[in-house]
């Protein structure tokens, strides 16, 4: 059980359950191949069965960390910061993004959109999940829609999600890693037949980097 003052700070977004932070190459989506500092925040109730960071789900496992410390570390490494999770919008992202902006940093978020958007973002990657659909306001703000393809029905889901997303969002289909041998050829064929979509791969896994 958190002390009351720490609990209040977490609720205000002044402290966040930090799982990990690291400098690497963005492996997925529009910014693939670019250097970025990743801040992974614990806590997620979306529950994707194929999630590769299930250890992020329980926020209680990750120590509440002052955002000043998070920002100080991020500012040492990169001009582009990616906030990911878990589901970062579980928490109020306003204080963290404001502090990062004051350092002149560019801020991206990777989110399922399951909670209302908080914070100020230069790039929003919306990756919707069937288990807990995005709230309406996130669709219109997304710069990028990235749908994970685990089975053939996910193509139908992808089109349903694209129909809700703003017309300027860049659309990606990405094979779920454990099904990549089976699904990648189907994605290639689908994108060739429906060229509004692009292929996204988890290139960091092929490169064996975080």
Image (cartoon, helix red, strand yellow):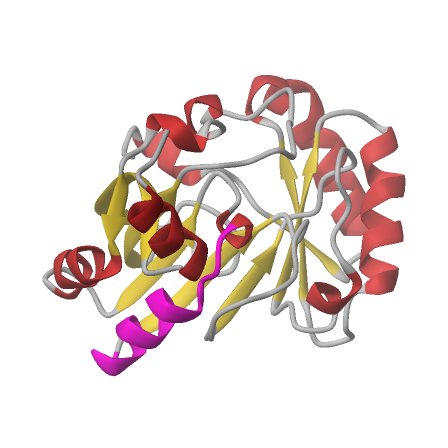
Give coordinates of residue 151: x percent, y percent. 78, 25
In the image, is 161 to the left or to the right of 145? Answer: right
Q: Which residues are magenta?
A: 91-104
Q: Main secondary structure of the magenta part?
A: helix
**Numbered label tally:** 0
In this view, the residue in front, 64 or 111, is 64
In the image, is 25 to the left or to the right of 153? Answer: left
In the image, is 190 to the left or to the right of 91? Answer: right
Magenta-drawn stretch contains 29: no
Magenta-drawn stretch contains 95: yes
In this view, the residue in front, 66 or 23, is 66
At 44% from the left and 70% from the top, the residue drawn is: 94
Image quadrant occupied by the C terminus: top left
At 81% from the left and 58% from the top, the residue drawn is: 162
Answer above or below: position of 42 versus 78: above
At 75% from the left and 39% from the top, the residue drawn is: 132
Give coordinates of residue 79: x percent, y percent. 23, 70
In this view, the residue in front, 62 or 164, is 62
At 64% from the left and 20% from the top, the residue drawn is: 49
Q: Quadrant of residue 9?
A: bottom left
Q: Residue at the far front: name it.
A: 4
Give coordinates of residue 133: x percent, y percent. 77, 46
Image quadrant occupied by the N terminus: top left
Answer above or below: position of 186 versus 135: above
Answer above or below: position of 208 versus 173: above
In the image, is 204 to the left or to the right of 171? Answer: left
Give coordinates of residue 175: x percent, y percent. 63, 33
């Amino acid at each position: 059980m958190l002390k009351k003052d720490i609990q209040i700070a977490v609720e205000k977004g002044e402290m966040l359950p930090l799982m990990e932070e690291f400098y690497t190459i963005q492996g997925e989506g529009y910014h693939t191949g670019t250097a970025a500092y990743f801040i992974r925040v614990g806590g997620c109730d979306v529950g994707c069965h194929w999630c590769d960071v299930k250890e992020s789900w329980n926020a209680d496992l990750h120590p509440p960390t002052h955002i000043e410390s998070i920002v100080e570390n991020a500012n040492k490494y990169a001009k582009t910061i990616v906030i990911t999770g878990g589901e970062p919008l579980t928490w109020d992202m306003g204080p963290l993004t404001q502090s990062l902006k004051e350092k002149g940093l560019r801020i991206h978020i990777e989110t399922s959109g399951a909670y209302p958007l908080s914070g100020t973002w230069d790039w929003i990657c919306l990756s919707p999940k069937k288990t807990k659909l995005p709230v309406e306001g996130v669709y219109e703000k997304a710069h990028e829609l990235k749908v994970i393809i685990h089975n053939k029905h996910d193509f139908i889901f992808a089109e349903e999600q694209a129909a809700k997303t703003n017309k300027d969002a860049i659309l990606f289909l990405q094979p779920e890693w454990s099904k990549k041998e089976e699904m990648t050829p189907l994605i290639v064929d689908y994108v060739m037949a429906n060229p509004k979509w692009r292929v996204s791969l988890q290139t960091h896994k092929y490169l064996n980097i975080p």
